[in-house]
Image (cartoon, grey):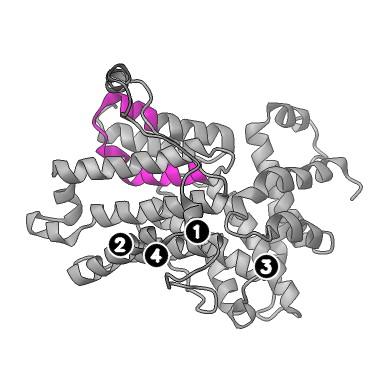
Amino acid sequence: MTDPQEARLVRHFVQNLAIWLDLCDERRMFEAVVPERAGSCPTLLNAILALSHRHLSHVNEEFKHSHIDKPSALGFLAYETACLEVLRQTPDNPVTSTDEENLFAATIILRVLEEMKADHGTKHRHGYLFGIKLNVERAERYMVPGSLSAASFWIGLRQEIYSAVMNHCQVGLKLVQSLVDQSLGIADDDTWANRAIVHCAQVLNFCFGDHGSISRWDQLNTWSNEWLASVPASWTPKYVKEFGRGKEKDQKETEDGGERFSEIWYNKGCHVIGMQHHLLAQLFLVGYDPRCDNLGTALKAVGEDPTYQKRMQALVRKICSIGLGNQWSPPGMFTACMAIAAFGDRFSHPRDREAVLEILRKTERDHARPTEEVQTILKKAWRWV
């Protein structure tokens, strides 16, 4: 690589963005393997360049201003367009499995870029999700644990969950049976995290599908409780300072608007994202409890019950606490934004409301994830505008 700008963009991806993707992959495929393959795969390289350029242009003022008057400097749209030209021309069966893996990984990276461009409720911006689904169907025959295609599948599933939460729809990605493990037996931490993520997808499909089955709700809730009871000791947080607990003075300060979240620290990204998806599944199960249907729609009834309100607030607060306490793993903040978008309107205390808005603002400011529309929706729900 001879272009200094492109070298900087690749380094930025490796040092700052691959961690978004390699959460549950001890092999760190997107940090280690993808950049190496990009050296011989222009489509993969252009995907990396597009994402890094977009991210740096948003979070780094020096980078943004150093390129604003240079027509020769390709912007993220030019890199993305170069990718699209190849992806559109790709035959149904690329020559080798490596070609397929590379294009799958490129589509995953471009989906991250798409998430940066789309705001809450922008349902039409899901082109790369469709591409991910096609890649899963095409690659399933050779998708084995430890491969780049397997790593791409797990990232794609998390991306589908993000879209489902933000757009109130079911998760459409096919689960690859050779990769999915829904047992509760002994396994490594990455597997435990992926179990929680698959379960979260199943819960969302229940909530945004036919959520009237009490027996199915009970089954999902039981599995969630069993998962929490079964995770190994390594999942114990390394440090916890719980919200609202402490001396009487501290409690009064909290009630008057001090810290609104607990401090919860983990050492591994898979613990952060796995526990958050477990809590997110619990949150949706509470919000869509079919036993409330006799009072109208489940969500409306739950929203009017103080017990459910407190439970939902506690779950959102804990998801946010994990995100804030582990900002070295940025997807924790993204998941916090998902919980806020879905149930942030349940908060009634002005300090809580301002605190969740600040999480949204901080996530957009630090990571180029759009949250302005979510903020507007919440303010309208609270009658702040």
Q: Position of residue 177 (x, y in %)?
A: 50, 78
Q: Earlier in the sequence, mark 3 or mark 2?
A: 3
Quarter of the picture containing the C terminus is: top left
Mark number displayed over residue 208: 2
Left-right relation of 212 to 320: left
Q: Earlier in the sequence, mark 3 or mark 1?
A: 3
Whole-angstrom CA distance, mark 3 to mark 4, is 23 Å
**Closest to the observer: 131 or 327?**
327
Check if residue 353 falls in the magenta segment: yes
Residue appearing at x 23%, y 66% in the figure: 218
Residue appearing at x 57%, y 67% in the figure: 153
Q: Which residue is mark 3?
A: 148
Which residues are the magenta region?
332-356
Q: Main secondary structure of the magenta part?
A: helix
Q: Are there few (<14), some (14-19), or many (20+) residues within 10 Å of tag 3?
A: many
- Kind of element beneath mark 1: helix
Q: Which residue is mark 1?
A: 158
